[in-house]
Amino acid sequence: MDQLIESLDSDRNALLDDLLEWLRIPSVSSDSRRQGEVRQACDWVSRKLEQAGLSVETIATEGHPMVVAQTAPIEGAPVVLVYGHYDVQPAEPLEDWVSGPFEPTVRDGDLFARGATDDKGQVLTHIQSVCRWLSAGHPLPLQIKFLIEGEEEVGSENLERMLPDLAEKLACDCVVISDSSQYADGQPAITYGLRGIATYELSVDGPSQDLHSGSFGGAVMNPAIALCKMLASMVDENGVIQIPGYYDRVQPLTDQERRQWRELPQSDEAFAANVGVQELFGEQGYTTDERRWARPTFDINGLTSGHQGEGVKTIIPAKASAKISFRLVADQDPRELTQQLNEHFSANAPPGVRWKLVSDHGAPGMLANIDTPFAKAAERAIDAAFGAKPVFIREGGSIPIVTRFQEVLGCDCLLLGWGLSDDNAHSPNEKFRVEDYHRGIQASARLWNEIAKQVE
């Protein structure tokens, strides 16, 4: 192990060059114009694994392909599946990027590019560690499989549908996923809970065409006003969501969790300054971490109506729409939410308009068991690589497929985030600290050894 770590230290430039090359490929899965580039990113990681000597298969889907690879099985040893994704979010608004989103650039120790932390940089740490184990001529002490898909950023629907048929191929004792963050700079973490997600578009129609606001104002309901009223009915001044039954399945936090999280070095003032707001807001009665990690939310993601160009155009718009999303906690059901939401809007839509709710995608939240040999092995590997013992946290974001892994594969889950909370995932100027990329590779390399020792 010492020799392997030394080789990783001496070869940092080559390890970073690999990431730069992969990041230059604009693999935006939601953009039909990028299909060629998405396939190019798939081929890149497939080739990387194949060159290291893994058995590699590219599996077609109704959308973008997924890569399944594996090392040789080791009799009596555990099997670990590494999951990640090669697709990335759209880069817009392009004008807000300091350097091009697909022109990876290192500034002040941070690597800026779309996909740097979500998820090319993080999943590549595990690919690099396995490739270096093999190239050094040392046999791995366990079998490692990879599942790297190209549709995580659009909901993983094809993978979710195909997973039962792939269960035998992907059979494992534990899934390892790096697509999240450390708790803070210098404080690594193991994430044991993820919130789920449900996304929708709400559209409101009024008159058959835009109307002159002078001739018709006061005589018809304005769809934009109706939309605002419907959205405003969703949450009260205390941050409590007003959908009847919304909180029925929400499990309360344990006293131990609340106590442990309050001992973390969290500062509301620093958090507010980091995200650029004067003060924080959320459901009363909960700390910032509790609201981010373990309470369900409602958000408006986009609003569209009326004149969007320069200057004033005094109209009553014919239609208005909003894209909305919910982050759900364990035991909440996205399908049940859809029914509750339709009932709520039916009760709160103003007269004189027609509305429609279209569901996009949804996934439940998850909780993992932290009292497992895999979690103990991860603690030791991370401590050795990062120089700090990890804390156990939950994460507010969603990785839709994780719960399905638990259900279909019957495996444990390890969520090991190497990023930082200010890495701007999904935003302009996404970044990944170069040092944490290298620490992640070393933690991954140690992890395989620690799991084999812990589970033997």
Image (cartoon, rainbow, N blue to C red):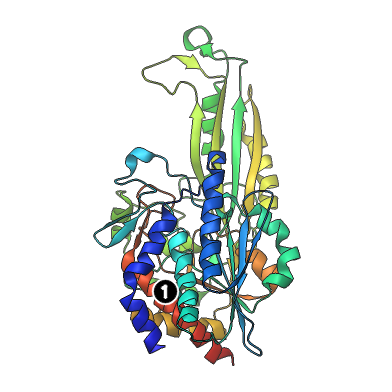
Q: Is residue 67 visible?
A: yes
> Which residue: 39% across, 16% down?
312
Q: Return the residue found at the far top.
A: 215
* Residue 159: % across, % down: 66, 58
Q: How many labels were placed on the picture? A: 1
Quadrant of image for the N terminus: bottom left
Report which quarter residue 389 is drawn in.
bottom left
Q: Is residue 378 visible?
A: no
On screen, 139 above or below 151?
below
Q: Dot 1, crowdedness within 10 Å: few (<14), some or many (≥20)? A: many
* Residue 427: % across, % down: 40, 48
Report which quarter residue 259 is drawn in.
bottom left
> Which residue: 33% across, 64% down?
433
On screen, 61 above or below 139?
above
Q: Return the residue found at the far left.
A: 108
Which one is nearer the viewer's eye here, 260 or 69? 69
On screen, 51 above or below 313?
below
* Residue 425: % across, % down: 42, 54
Would you name the residue on which mark 1 appears?
441
> Which residue: 57% across, 23% down?
319
> Which residue: 55% across, 42% down?
324
Which one is nearer the viewer's eye here, 93 or 333? 93
Which one is nearer the viewer's eye here, 47 or 380? 47
Amino acid type shown at disc 1: Ile
Side of 103 where 75 appears, left or right: right
> Could you say whether the residue bearing mark 1 is in a helix, strand or loop?
helix
Side of 444 where 111 appears, left or right: left
* Residue 91: % across, % down: 43, 44
Which one is nearer the viewer's eye here, 233 or 273? 273
Quadrant of image for the C terminus: bottom right
Side of 267 where 328 appears, left or right: right
